Amino acid sequence: MSTDRRTRAWIEVQSASLRRNFRRLREAVPEGVRLVPMVKADGYGLGMLDVVRSLAREAPWGWGVATVDEGVSLRSAGITEPVIVFSPLPPGSEAAAVAHDLTVTVSQVETLDRLRECAGERPVRVHLEVDTGMGRAGFAYDSVRDWGPSIRSRLVPPLKWEGMFTHFHSADEAGGPGVDEQMARFRAVAGHLNPPSAVLLHVANSAGLLRLGRGLRGFSLARPGIFLYGGRCGSDLPPPEPVVAVRARVVRVAEVPAGATVGYGSTYRAEAPQRWATLSIGYGDGYRRAASNGAEVLVAGRRAPVVGRISMDMTVANITGVPGVIPGDVATLLGSDGEEEILLEEVAAWMGTIPYEVLTGLTPRLPRIWTE
C-alpha cells in the first residue's frame, strides 16, 4: 500500500498564512480586544486540532466551537484555554459541557436551570446571547425588561456571568447594512442590564472586525472565522492571504475527435478535436457537481475549463493547447500554480455557494497536508 498522501488528490494548508491572517486581524482592533478564533466544523474543514496547534503560537484568548462534542475534542487533546460553545445547548448536553469546563452560550432561561442542576459546586462560565436581528438564537433585544430580571437572578454561583454578545447579520455586505442598528440595540441591552465591568462584551466576526476596526474600543473579544482561512469577508473589505490549495493528479490524457461527449448525461460535446485530462477528484471529495461545465482548473500553470458533469470520483478538463501534460501531473482546483491563481471566491461562484461551504464541504477522503 502506498504511504504517499499526494498520490490522488489532497488539500494543502499553509500554516504561516493562517497565522499571518490572525496577526492582521489582531492589528486591526484596539489594544485590549482579544481574538477567539472560530474552529468549529473541524476548523472550517481543514482539521480543527491542526488549526488550533498552528494558531496557538499567536496566544489567542480562547477558541470558538459550535457543539459540545467539538469542545470535548479540544479538551481531550489537552487544550486548556477557554472554549466557547456558540450554539444553544440541546437539552441533555449540559452535563458534558460542565464536566469538560466548556463555556456555554445561553439563549433561554431554561438552559440556566439545567446547567445549575448539573453543576453541583463546579463553576460554569456563561455568555448571554442577545438577538439584535439575526433571529436564530439569543434573547430578544426588545424584551429585555421581561427576561432581564429572571436572568440576573439566576446568574449566581455556581453560574458565572462571564460574557454577553450578539452576532451581525450583514456585516459582510458592502457598507455593512444593519451593523449600526444592531450595535445600538446591543448597547441598549447592555445599558439596561448594567453588567459588571468584568463581563466580556463581544460582537464582531471577521467582517465586523474589519469593518469596525478601532470602533470596537470598549469591547473585550472578537470572533474571527472565514478571514483566517483565506476567505474574503466583504467585497469592500481587505482580502486575506490565501491559506488553502486543492490539488489532484491527472490520471488519463486522451485525444478526442469532434463530436466526442463526456460525463453523465453527455452534457458536453467537443466541437473540434480536443485533448482531455481526467483528474482524480469529484464530488465525493467535496468538488461539487454544481461546478460542472463552468469551473476552471490549473494545469501546467494555465487555466483549463472543466467539461461535462463532475462525477463522484473524477473530473475532466479540456487541456487543448496545454502541451506536455501526462498522467501523474498535478492539477490545481483551488490555489496557485505559477503565475495563475484560482481564488476561493471563484470556486464558490462556480458552485453557486459561499466560501464557507466550499471549505467545510471538503470531505475526509482528501488528506490535509500542512506546510509552513
Image (cartoon, rainbow, N blue to C red):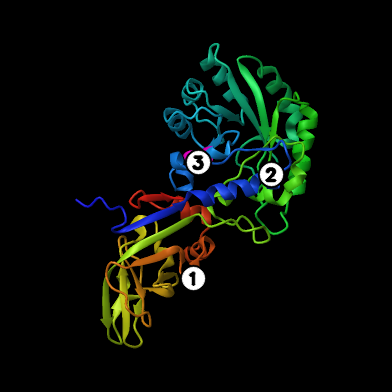
User: Closest to the observer: 356 or 370?
Assistant: 370
Q: Amino acid at mark 1?
A: Glu
Prevailing secondary structure of the magenta residues: helix
Rendered image: mark on residue 133 = 2
Q: Which residue is mark 3?
A: 40
| Mark in the foreground, 2 or 3 | 3
| Disc on the earlier residue, 1 or 2 | 2
Residue 260 place in picture, x, y as percent: 28, 82
Q: Quadrant of residue 285?
A: bottom left
Q: CA distance from mark 1 to mark 2?
A: 41 Å
Q: Which contiguous range is marked in magenta?
A: 52-56
Residue at the location (48% across, 63% down)?
347
Q: Which type of secondary structure does the marked residue at label 2 adopt? A: loop
Q: Quadrant of residue 161?
A: top right
Does 206 appear in magenta? no
Residue 370 place in picture, x, y as percent: 42, 49
Q: Amino acid at mark 3?
A: Lys
